[in-house]
Image: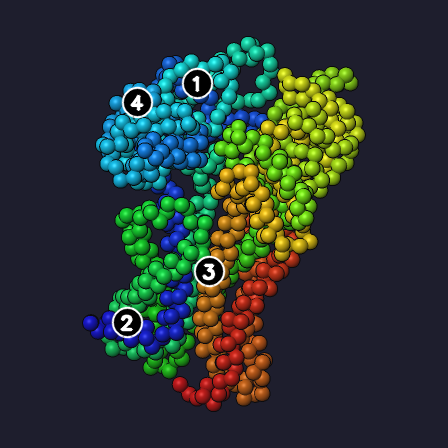
Amino acid sequence: MSLQTRTVFRQLWRQRLFTLLNVLGLAISISACWVIYRIVSYEYSFDDPLPQKAHVYRIVTGLIFDEKETYNGGVSAPLYQGIREQVTGVDRVVPVFGQWVNSVEIPGPKPVVIEEFKGVVATDATYFAMVPYTWLAGNAATAFSAPENVVLTESRAKSYFGSLKPEAIIGRVLLYNGKDQRTVAGVVKDLDYPTEFTAKEFFVLSPKTYKLAEWTNTNGSDRVYLHIRNLADTGRVLAQISSIAKQKWDENTRESGLPIMVKRWFKLLRLEDSHFSTYVREREVRKVSKPVMRGLIGLGALLIILACINYINLSTALVPQRSRSIGVRKILGSNSGHLIRQILTETFVIVLLAVGCSFLLTKLAYSFLGDIIPDGMHEHAGGWGILYFLALLLAGITLLSGGYPAWLMSKIKPIGLVQGQSAVQLSGGSRMGLRKVLIVFQFVIAQVFIVGALIMGSQLNYTLKKDMGFDKEAVVLVNVPWKLQRDSLYRNRHFVLAEELRKEAGIQGVSVGWAPMSNTYASSMFEYRGAEVKDPARRQLFKKYVDTAYIRLYNMQLVAGRNLRPADTTNEYVINEAAVRALGFSSPQEALGKLIGQLSGPRYPVVGVVKDFHQQDFHTSIDPVALMAEKSDAVTLNIKLNSADPGKWQQILKTAEQKWYGIYPSGSFSYKFYDETLAAMYKQERNQSRLVNLAMIIAIIISCLGLFGLAVLIAFQRTKEIGIRKVLGATVAGIAQMLMSDFIKLIFIALIIASPIAWWAMDRWLEDFVYRIKIEWWMFVLAGAMATIIAMLTVSFQAIRAALANPVKSLRPV
C-alpha cells in the first residue's frame, strides 16, 4: 500500500464520524437514484430490439363524446382491409385483433379444460414480419396457410402440453369455447424483452366481407399497425385513411337514415410513444406517463445533488481542523496538485463505500416500494447499462462532491502558521457564505417535499372521505363470473341468491345492479322530443342497470318523484340532476313524466330524480346518468352488511359463500369491499404520494446531516467566544439558543423561497382533479414548523455540547 493510500485511510479513520455521515448520506441518494434508473431504463426499453421500430405506427381513434375528447386504442375492424387496398405509402398493414376465449380444452384420454385466460389475438403472417420471433417449430408461411390453425408461444405450449417438444406439438388439436377446433401449426419462443406485444396465442385472421355498419364501430381490442418506410409520408397516409373512413361513415348514415352524434378521427401513434400514451384508453394495458418518468429522472438528479451538497458541507466543516496539518505539509514540500489528488482519493473511497452500502439499501427500497416497481423489471437485467450507470455515478459524484473541498484545502497558505494565525484563518475565513447557501438550498427542497406530501395526502383523503352522493360503507360486491353468466344452467340464479341473502340477520340489504362508481361504464345517446321544444334535446347519458333495492341500499337521495318499480326490462327511468340539466329541464319536478329514450329506441317516462353522485373518479366531472331495469345486464350483487357490528362480518361472508356454493360451483366465489375498490381507483395517485413521501424523508435526512456538519463547524469556530461568554456568566441555555438562532434564520429563509415553488407545483398537480382541495396557508406553516423542529433536534446536541464545554480549555492559547 502506497504512502498516499495509507494517508487517505488514516484520515478517514481519524474522522470516522464524518466518514460515516458522508457514506450514509451518499448511500441513501445513490440507492434512490439506482432504483429510479432501473425503473426508467425499463420503461424506455419497450420494444427496443424491434427492427425499424421508428417506422412502425399504430392507428388510434379520436372521439368527441358528450363534448369530451378521448382516444381509443382500437379501430373499426374493416379499416385494415381498406388501407391495404387503397392507401399508398404503407409497406405493411398488420391487424392484431383481440379474441375473447372463455375456455380451452386439450383433448386426450382425460381432457383438460383451462378456463378464463388472456393473451389470444387474431392476425396474419405480416405480424411475424413486423415482430420477429424465433420459430421453435413451424414457420410463418405454413402456420397461416389454413384458417383453423393456431400458433402458440413456448410458455403457452408448456402450459397445455407440459414437457412435449415443440415438434411433437405440431398437429395437436385444441378446442376453444367448447366448439371452435384449431390445430397447432407453429410454436415460437417468447419475446425476452419488454414489449406491448404480449399475446401468447395467434389465430389466423381470414379476410371477410364486413357489413357497412361495422365501419362505424370502434373496438378497443382491434389494433392496426403500419410500417411506413418514408416517415415524411405519414401526413399523406393519415389523410388517405381518414378519407376512406369518412366515405364509409357517410354511406352508413345515408343507408340507416340515423344521424350519428359522435365526431371521430384517427391519429398515427409512433410505436416508440405507444407505451407512454396514457391518454389512449385501453383495457388491461399497462402504460406510464412520460412526464412522470421525466419527474423521476429529475428527482434522482436532485437527490444526488443534495447528497453532493451534504458531502461538501461536511467536508468543508473539517477544513479548519485540517488546515494546520495541510499547512505543515505544504511547508514540507507538498504542492496543491498533490493535495487535490489526496482529497479526491478520499472522496472516491467514500463514494465507493456508499455504492457498496447502496446495494443493501436498494433491496430494502424494492420491498418498500412494492407495487410501484413495474412488473417484469427484475427480469430485465439491463446488461452493461447498469455498470455504465454506476461508473458514471461514481465518477460524477466524486468530482462534484470532492472538487470544491479539494480546491478549498489547496488554497490554505502555510505562511499563516509562521504568523500565528488560527485554524479558521488558515482555512480562508469564517463567513461560511457558500455553506449557508447550500444549507438553505437543501431545506428549500426538503420543505417543497413536505408541503407536497401534506397536500397529496390531503387530496387523497378528500377523495375517499368526501360525500360521493351514495353510502359506500359496509358494502360488499360479488360479481357473477362471465362464464356462469353465459351458462344456461346458471342464468339468473343470482336473483335467487339475492333473495336468500336478504333473509340473513347480519345483512341490511341486497341489490342486483352496477356499482355507482367504477372504472367501467356504458353510455348511449338519449333524446327528449317534447312539444314545448323546437329541436330535440340530445345528450350522452351513462347507463346503470339496477333493481328496486338499489337507491335504498346506497342511501341515494330522491329529490323528486319515486323509485323504479319491479321489472325485467326497461320501462321507466330514474335520472340524476345532471341529466335533468343536460336534457333541458328547468327543475327535477319538470322532468317527471317526460318521455326520453335512446336514439331509434322506445321512449319511457322519467319517474324519479336522484341527487347527483359520482360515477367515475375525482378527475372527472359528474355526468348525466340514467338508472334503469335490465335483468339480463345486472350481474353484480351489492350486499350491505350491518355496519353496527363489523365483528360479525367475516361470519356473514362465510354464510354468503355457503349459500353461493349452494347455487354455483365451488371455486367461483369472490368478493371485494366496495370502499377498497374505490381506493384502488387512485392507485397512481397513491404511488406518486408514496414517492414524494420517500423523497421527503431522504431530503430531510440528507439536509439534517448537512446541518449537523455546519453545527460542528460553527461550534468549532466560536469556541473562544463561547468560553468568554461562559466566564462572563452566560448560561448553557442562553449559549445553546445563540448557536441555534443562526439555523432558525436559515430555515425561515428556506421557507420563504420554498413556499411559492411548492404552491405552483401542487397547484399544477391538483389541476388534474375536477374535485379538489384548496391549498391552505396552514400547510406551509406546518411544513415550516416540521422543518424547524427537525433542524433544532439535529443541531441541539452539538449546541448543548459546545455550551457545556470547559471554558478554561477553550481559552487556552493555541
Helix or strand or loop: what does disc 4 sit on?
loop
Q: Three-letter amino acid code at disc 3?
A: Ile
Of callouts 4 and 2, the N-terminal one: 2
Q: Position of residue 100 (x, y in %)?
A: 44, 29
Q: Position of residue 799 (x, y in %)?
A: 51, 77
* 4 and 2 marks in contact (CB < 8 Å): no
690 or 300, which is in the foreground? Answer: 690
User: Which x, y percent locates residue 486?
Assistant: 51, 29
Query: What is the spatial separation of the Cα atoms under label 1 and label 3, in whole angstroms?
Result: 54 Å
Give the distance between the C-alpha atoms of the residues marked 4 and 1, in whole angstroms. Answer: 20 Å
Of label 3 and label 4, which has the lower sequence position? 4
Contact flag, marks 2 and 1 (Cβ < 8 Å):
no
Label 3 sits on residue: 698
Image quadrant of residue 333?
bottom left
Q: Which residue is mark 2?
A: 8
Dot in front, 2 or 1? 1
The residue drawn where x is 40% and y is 69% is 21
